[in-house]
Amino acid sequence: MAASAAPSVRSADSGGRNHGLWIFLIWLPIALAADLLIYFVWGPHLPPGTMSNTAQSQQFDIKVMAVMAAPVMAGVLVYFGYALVVWRQRDGDDSDGPAIHGHAGIQAAWITVTSVIVLSLAVFGTYELAWKGMDGAGAGQGPSPIWKPAGGTPLQVQVIGQQWRFTYRYPQFGGFETTDLVLPVGQAVQFNVTSLDVIHDFWAYQLGVKADANPGVNNVAYTTPTHTGVVTVRCDELCGLWHGAMFNYGKVVTMAQFQAWANKTETQLASITAILPPYSTVYDPTVVPQMSKAMQKGGLTGGNGYYYPPNDPVQP
Amino acid sequence: MAIETQPDQAHGAGGGAPAHRGRRPWWQRPAIHTALIGAVVGYLLGHVLGNYLAGSGNSLYPNIALSDSSDWPIVLGYLLGVVGWLAGLGVFNDVLRQMIGKPAPLNGVNGGPEHETSGLARYFRYSLDHKVVGIQYLVGMIIYFCTAGLFAMAIRTELLSPTHHVFTSQAYVEIVGEHGTMMMMLMTSVVVGPFGNYLVPLMIGSKRVAFPRIEALSFWLTPAAFLILLSGLLLGGFPFGWTGYAPLSVQSTLGADSYAMAFGLMGISVILAGFNIIVTVICYRAPGMRWSRIPMFVWSMVATSFLFVLAGPVLVGGMYMMLTDRTAQTAFFEDSLGGSSYLYQNLFWFFGHPEVYILALPGFGIVSELIPVFTRKPLFGYRVAAAGMIGVTLLSFFVWQHHLFDSGINPDMRPLFMLTTELISIPTGFIYLVAMGTFWKAKIRFTVPMLFALGMYFNFLIGGISGVFLSDVPADTTEHGSFFVMAHFHYTIMGGLIFAFMGGIYYWLPKMMGIKLNQTLGKWQFWLMFIAFNSTFLPLFAVGMAGQPRRVFEYAQNLQPLNDWVSISSFFLGGSILIFVVNFVWSTVIAREPEIGNPWQSRGLEWQVASPPPPGNFERIPVVLSGPYEYGDKNAQPVADLHPPPGVITAAITGATSVRAEA
């Protein structure tokens, strides 16, 4: 921004060095080098990685933002650096600088250039958000999502937040509830994120998925894992004392492994699933504890009748 | 126009009773000690009343009695404690006096008859002199800032290790909440309070502010808010940071009452402060002080004040609803009873996003005021700078939902809020255009205030550009709620506002106190603060991008080296603030090297009077002749005629049109 406007001030300089040109010449290689490094060297390693289509879109956005930001930052810093070196007060010179009150051309150029940069970034961001393959960039879209993955029904995974742990229900596999997050590679996933108590936030870092878990709200987020591996899940919204300890790990595995795991777990947990509240997009937190008698009768001994009692880690 | 040409007469005619009345001994006059007594008495009364209301013996309000809520005694105690605090200060004395038909002159305003023109005691009273209020604010803000800063040191101490804990999770979450809330609620006034109240009348050529009582009240609410917030620690703190999202905040234990009460009080304080400044600038400008001549700092104060009065009520409303949810069993934020936790998020951020510009605009104002003086050039693009501030003010009300991109609200507005958020970087960028234009072929003087201004430009550049990353929904999905956001707003607030605040102190303290701050210590402070600040917060961008959420006390093992680096840097940052405190105390209490003239050769109107300014600021209302930034212009007139011949102002007021045509 800075340097793009700088050459036009040449005329203001009567005699001596052409400051605008100098600043431009210092800025150009720095900006070029920074952009090339960011795009080609640093870019492929930028967070959050490439484990899903949404993660890829976030990585690409961060990369493009960085490519746009680097020349702007370089321009401002080169300009200030140049000014501080060249236009500092010399010893014994107490006089004032030239009385320049403004320059219509430079002001107009600045406003135009910054507006173009900013508007193009907004257009770019909107395209990245709403484009078909991006599924709403992995952000929680609430109960009525508008950017959905193409193709058939996605794998449904319900994420239930409570103080202070996440559990997962798989409604397409009988609605069993487990603390393990296992996903198949190459399959679109629909996370239905909800909470039993306060607001949590489901952040599957490597998948590029982030959605608040609100009590009484089904917050939907989509992603399609593209590689197998381990996923870190952290709570990203301050939810009370043990917020910092509210994390676990998920796995992205092959479709065959996933099928095997899901079928096995469904059978294993069948008796427990029968006692759980029937699968639903949201749960009334005031009702869940009242089910304790039925649950205890069925052999569930978790505190307060929760299948998984609230998780209160021991101070190490 | 509310210019009083004959202030002394105006007072003399009013009866002048206080001047003649014998002075009572100090302990019988309202001051901070009577205020403390009032607060304690008020709290106890409120506590008893609350216990009665919520007790089983109360048949008047069965709902409340049945709620079995122990929040009542606390909330009513705080409420009546504040009333007692203000009553003890004598806030209501003049009001009551007027109610029974007695005169209530504005002592200390306008340089009129006043019994506290000197002495330390006036700083502990409900003083109506805007210069006293400015100093009160300055000292208060430094105390609040350092207290909240100590909490930050504690946070970084805990984060030295991901597994070994210094604090319990309870203590840690209390510390996080106290640090965040104290900084965000009290630092709203860090510039408007000291510099806005002190300097705006001087800069616009006024002898007084428009509403001295409201101004004084706005200050005296801040210690109350500060103490109430701190008292939350005695009640077990509050586990929800500075945002206080329902339902966690509604369900939390008693400490949450201190959060809601303190934040709400501070909301009232900023509404009052902003109201006073807006009216002062509109109505109390000296003749010739046109809108195209008012200093950029005053523009920033006006812009900030509009944010105060427009955003503040939303905060107060939100806090009030939270308190009634906690006490009177309303369900504004309770989904299962027909309320909505999104309502709180929307209310909070509808205040909260303008607030972050409340924490940026004053900084813009200070640096824009400093650079013409130290580059010895006129401010480049005065209109662009003012337009930038107005643009930021307007747009800041249209961006709040970018805090809710992942929250599960309907997604169809996301492109719009992405657009508005990106747009706000255009007027913010004007500040850089103005700075770079001003630096062009300048004669830059590297004084301590200038160093802080340069530091501000450097830091805010990083803070601002990282904000553009956050406006982009896909990129934000990774960055939201992580240390990236935390680094971003520390760059804009600490790196922007606090650096500018420090520059402002070094620049204006000679004006406000008539003493010089030690410049060598100032340079040490700047360099340590600048290096340590960047060394603290730059790595946190990486930490956040690598997946560390905010407000956690356990984090991934592989992030420990970076976190340790940050923690150690933050201790150096704390050390730089310690240098400042030492310098401040040393220079103002012990060394007291006098500075009476115009040490920076500034054209600012505030520098044309003695330091510290006499009571009533100006002997006569000055007539402003030219703008404040006409450096290097040999034909420029002096900034103002401080001793206009008698009758000129009356003529200017009665024949305003002719004067305007002349100028």
Image (tube, rainbow, N blue to C red):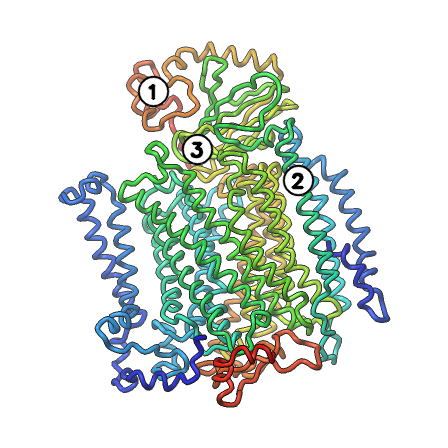
In front: B559, or A65? A65
Q: Which residue is mark 2?
A: A123
Are the residues under marks 3 and 2 on the same chain? Answer: yes
Q: Earlier in the sequence, mark 3 or mark 1?
A: 3
Marks 2/1: CA–CA distance? 54 Å
Marks 3/1: CA–CA distance? 26 Å
Please tell me whether mark 3 or mark 1 is closer to you in this view: 3
Q: Which residue is mark 3?
A: A214
Q: Please, is residue B65 above or below residue B608 in the view?
A: above
Q: Please, is residue B165 above or below residue A301 in the view?
A: below
- The quarter in which the N terminus of chain B is drawn is bottom left
Q: Is residue B236 visible?
A: no
Q: Residue B193: percent from the left, percent from the top?
A: 46, 66
The kind of residue on which mark 3 rests is Asn
Kind of element beneath mark 1: loop
The kind of residue on which mark 2 rests is Val
Q: Residue A221: percent from the left, percent from the top?
A: 54, 28
The kind of residue on which mark 1 rests is Thr
Q: What numbered label is drawn on residue A301?
A: 1
Q: Residue at x 76, y 47 (%)?
A: A34
